[in-house]
Amino acid sequence: MFRTLLTLDQVKKLIDDLGLEALDSEEISLKEAHGRILAEDVISSLDIPPFDRSTVDGYAVKAEDTYGAEENVPTYLGLVGAVNVGEPPIISISKGETVEIVTGAQIPDGADAVVMIEDTEKKDSSIVVLRAVAKNENIMRKGSDIRKGETMLSKGQKLGSREIGVIAAIGRARMRVFIVPSVAVLSTGNEVTEPGHDLPPGRIYDINAYSLAGAVIESGGKPVNMGIAPDEENQLRETLKKALALADVVVTSAGVSVGPKDMLPQTIDALGKPGLLFSGIAVKPGKPTTMAIIGRKPVFSLPGHPASALLIFHLITKPIIQKLAGRSSTEINAVKAIAGKRMFSAKGRRTFVMVNLGRDRLNKLVAEPVETGASGAITTLAKADGYLEIPENVQFIDENEKVVVTLLSSRA
């Protein structure tokens, strides 16, 4: 393993050539829709509003009947009825007449404007108009917000509060969304202990299962925690088989290097065709990353170091989960900054440097490398806002050089 390292670009092309597509769709109710991805265009079957409606409390009038009206020279109109919200008007107005109306109520036939109540006075059976209104003033016309046949939302959009409000506005109670991909997350190693238990000598708590499960959720997937598999081939094989049966994607961590207990690549390759796609990428950190396809299901075997595992997940695993989830794009959340100090690359490998972001005295965004001394240091996860990339043919990024920082989350 790792005798022939693929470049990151070769790995990405290899994955693209797989032609993986979104999973199937399902129909859900509006109450279940938040955070889901549309599997269809949402087209309005009606005009919104479905009728001409008043935007104020006042009196529906013929605009021309109010022309010239002002406080010193008011206009008198005969009050012939009222229209309440939620009720179709059973009355119409003629020249010289008006109807009392409330906000949201349907405009009666014959009216083409509404005078605000504060611009009127009531006197016996007449309404005194103290200010003229123009035609269509204080009226929201039928279809002015949404037209029948208009595409309101597009396939691939994520449904948030605003999008759900649009769907409710056109009367839809159900819609088709993409099935959320399930992602089995498996940690390996005899030294790993589940959080919440006493920590025996020589062992560490399982960081990766929980950080990667969070990353799965952020990518639009649903994590399935498979627990910890020991470095024993038969148990590892059975756990992987179970993971493949339960999930659409499998993500493992550790067991992919060249140690005597690192048996994941061979074990996964034996699970089915087409098997191993690559084992080793010319990047730092993350060199021992391995990927296989078993049937049509991707299996990613990430390094055991927590920061390395999370970085590689963002580089190659996240886009696959997003694609299976039906997301229309895999937008990269990145910011421009300047390097806080000189940062060196690893010879012949594309290097990714974990950084945190701050401001200098001129309020410029500065990317400072997270000093940990090791790619697996736990503090890297807490300190890093994102990472910057040094190409294979670049020896270093100099202090104050302009850089692009890809964010690990939206918190920076």
Image (cartoon, rainbow, N blue to C red):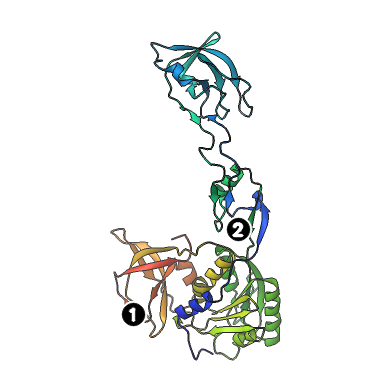
Q: Position of residue 243 (x, y in %)?
A: 68, 75
Displayed quadrant of residue 372: bottom left
Q: At 50% across and 70% down in the image, what residue appears?
A: 314
Q: Position of residue 41 (x, y in %)?
A: 57, 53
Looking at the picture, tell me which residue is in the foreground, 39 or 135: 135
Tell me if residue 38 comes above or below residue 318 in the rendering.
above
Horizontal placement of 79 versus 294: left or right? left
Q: At 59% across and 16% down in the image, what residue appears?
A: 81
- The image's mark for residue 39 is 2
User: Spatial distance from mark 2 to mark 1, Cα to Cα?
Assistant: 43 Å
Q: Earlier in the sequence, mark 2 or mark 1?
A: 2
Q: Nearer the viewer, mark 2 or mark 1?
A: 2
- Kindly identify the amino acid type of the residue bearing the numbered disc 2: Ala
- Kindly identify the amino acid type of the residue bearing the numbered disc 1: Val
Displayed quadrant of residue 211: bottom right
Q: Position of residue 46 (x, y in %)?
A: 59, 41
- The image's mark for residue 394 is 1
Q: Is residue 39 visible?
A: yes
Looking at the picture, tell me which residue is in the foreground, 309 or 60: 60
Query: Which class describes the residues within 10 Å of circle 2: few (<14), some (14-19), or many (20+)?
Result: many
Mark 1 falls on what kind of element? Answer: loop
